[in-house]
Image: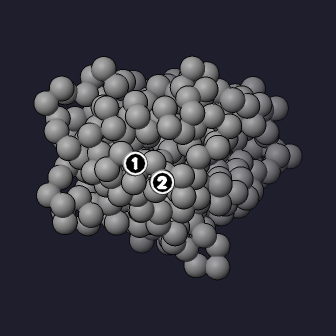
Amino acid sequence: MSLRLPVWRSLDEIPADLGATTVVIGNFDGLHRGHRVVVSRARARADEVGLPLVAVTFDPHPMSVLRPEHAPPQLTSIATRVDLLADAGVDAVLVLPFDRSMAAWTPREFVDRVLVRALAVRAVVVGANFRFGTRASGDVALLRELGGQEGFEAVGVDLDGGPQVWSSTYVRTCLAAGDVAGAAEALGRPFSVTGVVVEGDKRGRELGFPTANVPTSALEAAPADGVYAGWLTRRDTGECYPAAISVGTNPTFDGERARRVESYVLDRDDLELYGVEVEVAFVERLRGMVKFEGVDALIETMHDDVRRAREILGA
């Protein structure tokens, strides 16, 4: 998690002497371009009134508590979300632990506990579709009304976008279709997954394409099964390498039960990455996942994947 700014994991962790603040609220999963418009507006307002900007977000996603069977896979971990919020210009992050107790708060209770008593808010900025309080009964109009009573202003900002408004749902839809370019357009950066490299079955090494394997979780978003061009970055050293990336379960070898992100760093067989945390960024889809009739056909296609990845990445 970022060391560049304060991160509070509960209301109790907020310093008693914090003073008045400007606040921006949202799930901010992925911190896509629509989110950044809202945060930018909040940053500008904070500068106008001369107060620090605190981003308020939630962990876990409220849907995972209220309707876990419909909970969306997360685009970013809390640690990554904090880093992205820091880059977007916030001064501190409050990560509220969302549970059924908080879900039962009325809109007025949320405003009183979080915005008034904990953060002494003077201005709060949210997306125009912001909902809060029990059964999502509060909206921007109610937030403005409560602000008038409590002495703070509330601003609702329309989310930005082209024909399709940027949203976390849109990014997940792109990823489910393997459209990593579309996801990158909405995010303002390539979509990436982060994890620690684990030891695999070494089948890629036997085929001449050693891979760094990162397990995926059903709780985390990943592109559709297939092969992609992208970049692998070591989180410890910052070294970045061009890669051909496979997402899936190895159907040619009867498949694994768990999906994995397997990255072959182009033209490198000397990297020792076991136990290293890496970030794998997806640039373009090369093809879908295929079950080959034999190893020779697989190897021939993998050579073509590497050639195309090299062209796309300019490596």
**Badge 1 is on which residue?**
149
Q: Amino acid at mark 2?
A: Glu
Residue at 57%, 20% in the rendered image: 101
For label 1, the SS is helix
Q: Position of residue 166 (x, y in %)?
A: 57, 66
Q: Amino acid at mark 1?
A: Gln
Residue at 55%, 29% in the rendered image: 105
Q: Position of residue 162 (x, y in %)?
A: 58, 78
Above or below 165: residue 151:
above
Seen from the viewer's position, the closer of residues 210 and 15 is 15
Q: Residues within 10 Å of mark 1 (few under 14, many from 20)?
A: few
Q: Disc 2 vs disc 1: Cβ atoms closer than 8 Å?
A: yes
Horizontally, is 263 left or right of 91 in the view? right
Seen from the viewer's position, the closer of residues 308 and 3 is 3
Residue at 25%, 28% in the rendered image: 14
Seen from the viewer's position, the closer of residues 152 and 228 is 152
Q: Residues within 10 Å of mark 2 (few under 14, many from 20)?
A: some
Above or below 8: residue 175:
below
Whether residue 273 can be seen here? no
Horizontally, is 240 left or right of 206 in the view? left
Residue at 75%, 43% in the rendered image: 295
Horizontally, is 188 left or right of 94 in the view? right
Colour logic: one colour
Whether residue 76 can be seen here? yes
User: Which quadrant would the N terminus be assigned to in this image?
Assistant: top left
Q: Position of residue 221 (x, y in %)?
A: 61, 43
**Badge 2 is on which residue?**
145
